[in-house]
Image (spheres, rainbow, N blue to C red):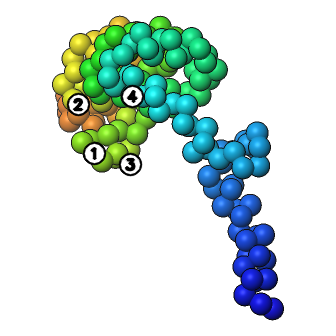
Amino acid sequence: MSSKDLVKEVMAVARPMAMAFVNEETEPGRPNHLRCHRVQAFRPLKQRAGGDQASDLKKALDADPHLLDDELEMAEILMEAASCGKTAALSTLLGAGVDPNIPAPYKEGCIIQSLLLAPLCAALAKGRHEAADMLEARGSIYDIYTACFLGTTVRSRSCWTRRRPATCWR
């Protein structure tokens, strides 16, 4: 067997496996439609949310409303607005129906942490109190994970002693 034949044989087996890793659990619309291609539509939204370009963000969401169906990507966009303290962008996203309690990867400086935080936790951690107040007013929950991450031991203890330790309201 020649090396070209061996490469073809390996690629015939490896390619579907590799495609399965980069695609989501559901089948892609086209065989070559990777998740990294699908998320490109969300990058400009994330930049607008972090840059407080709320009017442009609203126009983009109105032009392509099915983007709101992807809760995980919208959570990252909400996280960007919350951690940057961009209240106009937060208001736009929350008004469009983005859930403020879905966690997203937390970015600290130029490093994206491997843990997921709720947007409220990110806003509080970054000292964006106006954004945190807006999130709480719109239904964001101060939960045990937020209390522990922020190191508020009194809050953490009160969350654990309640009957429902998974959530803790202010």
State the image quarter where residue 70 is shown.
Answer: top right
Task: Tell me if mark 2 has few (under 14), some (14-19) or many (20+) residues whose alpha carbon lies within 10 angstroms of its own.
Answer: some
Mark 4 is on which residue type?
Gln
Cα distance, mark 4 to mark 1? 15 Å
Q: Position of residue 51 (x, y in %)?
A: 32, 23
Task: Tell me if mark 4 has few (under 14), some (14-19) or many (20+) residues whose alpha carbon lies within 10 angstroms of its own.
Answer: some
**Residue in view at x 76 percent, y 39 percent:** 29
Cα distance, mark 1 to mark 3? 13 Å
Of the numbered discs 3 and 2, the one sitting upstream in the chain is 3
- Locate the C terminus and report the quarter of the image it occupies: top left
- Locate the N terminus and report the quarter of the image it occupies: bottom right
Cα distance, mark 3 to mark 2? 16 Å
Q: Do the residues labelled 3 and 4 touch (CB within 8 Å)?
A: no
Q: Are marks 3 and 2 in contact (CB under 8 Å)?
A: no
Query: Which residue position holds label 2?
Result: 125
> Which mark's residue is nearer the viewer, 3 or 4?
4
Of the numbered discs 1 and 2, the one sitting upstream in the chain is 1
> Which mark's residue is nearer the viewer, 1 or 2?
1
Q: Is mark 3 on a helix, strand or loop?
A: strand
Mark 3 is on which residue type?
Ser
Q: Position of residue 65 (x, y in %)?
A: 61, 16
* Residue 26 can be seen in this image: yes
Query: Which residue position holds label 4?
Result: 47
Query: Which residue position holds label 1?
Result: 110
> Which mark's residue is nearer the viewer, 1 or 3?
1
| Along the line of sight, the residue nearer the viewer: 74 or 46 | 46
